[in-house]
Amino acid sequence: MVYCGKPSRACSNCRSRQAKCDRKQECGQCRRAGLQCPGPRDSNELVFRDQSQEVSRKVTTKSSRSIIPKSIIATILEQAKALFFNRYVNGNARTYDYIASFIPKTDWGSCLSAAIDATSLAYFSAQNSSPVVLRYARENYVLALRLVGEALQSRDQATKDPTLVSVLLLDLFEKLTRTHRSSESWTKHMKGAIELFKLRGDAQFRSVLGLRLFLQFHSTLLIGCMQHNARVPCHLIELRREASQYIDPIDPKWNFSEIVLRFVELRAETREGRLKSKELLDTARCLDAELKVVAETVPPEWKYDTVIVPSPVEVYGEYFHVYMDHHMTHTWNNIRIIRILLNELIREHYLSQADPAELSSIFSAESHDDDYAHVSDCILTLSTEIVASVPQYTQLPRHVNGHVSEPSSIECSTHYPSIPRKNSLSHLPQISSSNSRRAEVKLGPQDFTLFETSRCYSLVFPLYVVGSSEVCSDSMQEWILTTLAFLQNIVGIKEAAVAASYLKGREIINPWSLYAMTGSYSFSA
């Protein structure tokens, strides 16, 4: 799906003859040439160009020559769908849980059906390192691309929810298969997707599903902008402005996404050298302060508790955090990630990018040193908080003596005011500074259920961000590498090995490229 700009409405005869068409129902050029004029083309039908054949050619050249016996294709597809649905639809992530509502109404052979098959097989292939299944996934991807291309030729079909869901799934397919797309190619496809949302109009925001699809695309596009070092398209900002009329203005995730958008713009302006030192530092500090306010003003149910543990190896330091659910954990860690990257931008500017003469006009020597130390301390504090979010999902609460038990050797203290628990964490002690408890804790590798595994996926990217920071201590990085090895070998998350390899090699990469490689969607979960 490629946006082609504003298309010509000239009739096909004039376009083939390279003649100037007056775009009337029966144009003058055809009349004079004695040709039957097909009439002007509908520009709304031509916003997108079907490049399925070209993409098909590229994909098939990468495919393996291995052949999947027909007798097991159906079984593999059934297993792949079950695995995919457990992670993305019915599982803890539930990024695509709305797909379940389409299943009874989805025709076999539709673009949505093909997209689900392709993405499920891609996920199955990634989890099982199967090039044979990957080949079959790519074949379904090519089919889905062709069917989406056909749907996009009709304005009515292009604006329907199943078509849009198919586009989002194909984007996930490319992440799961690590399909390389150049910045130029990505920009064209991004513009095409934006045009699709523009065609849907304001009505999409009045629908619960329509609004959710936009928010998911909005998050995906912002991450893509960071991955490709691109500016936020002005049309996305316009769509966001329209959507804001239908969103709670105090929603923490919505306010967070607004700051992320401005962070993307700051990165672009910094890279292009458009900002002077003072302007860059002031903007970065302002965004960091706003994120701090977002974190400090979350609703009570978003606040987390601190559990103090007598230094088991599975916990870095002597405590970990307990959150109401994993979605809140992700949102907290996303806020921390952006704050870390903002403060690293400030820190790097101090070290290498700033004009010393300009900096001296902004700070005295003492205030410069104090500010530099404050930035480093801030990164370390945020990193420690991310690390403290891990044990809840890798070790506790199920992995206590092999079963759920009432803790009595874990000392629990209040980080935020205690709140009633109504979910799977309700068996943990109510945390109160005046009522500490202790229990015998035996932590160790255990078999993880699929549900528990799905919750661990989005720990990989935050751990990489922390481990790649210049402020990260040797002991913290060692703990992170140990945890990534645990996620890979015990939990079964192969993407953890990718993050660990970059950390071990100390290779400097755009962190958002790794985010895309892991197929993670925690920012829109």
Image (cartoon, grey):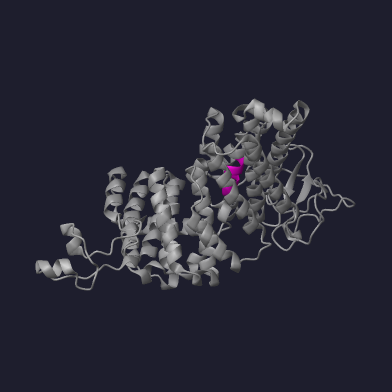
- Which residue corresponds to the image point at 67% horizontal and 31% vertical from the top-left? 471
Give the camera-side residue of 469 and 395: 469
- Residue 395's place in the image compared with 146, above or below, is above
* Residue 404 picture location, percent across and down: 71, 54
Q: Position of residue 103 (x, y in %)?
A: 44, 69
Q: Quadrant of the N terminus?
A: bottom left
Question: Compared with residue 522, is residue 201 higher up or lower down, i.e. above or below?
Answer: below
- Indicate yes or no whether the magenta region holds residue 462: yes
Q: Nearer the viewer, residue 517 or 496?
A: 517
- 252 horizontally vs 204: left or right: right
In depth, the one of 65 and 246 nearer the eye is 246
Residue 181 visible from this viewpoint = no
- Picture coordinates of residue 509 (x, y %)? 51, 35
Q: How many marks?
A: 0
Left or right: 422, with 414 as reference point: left
Image side of residue 390 versus residue 409, left or right? left
**Residue located 80% across and 49% down the image:** 415
Residue 394 relative to residue 76: left or right = right
The magenta stretch spans residue 270: no
Q: Residue visible at 42% across and 55% down?
A: 191
Residue 298, position as x, y percentages in the image: 73, 57
Q: Is residue 412 visible?
A: yes
Q: Quadrant of the C terminus?
A: bottom right
Q: In the orientation shown, which residue stands out farthest toward the right?
A: 434
Q: Which residues are magenta?
A: 456-463
State which quadrant residue 423 falls in: bottom right
Q: Main secondary structure of the magenta part?
A: helix
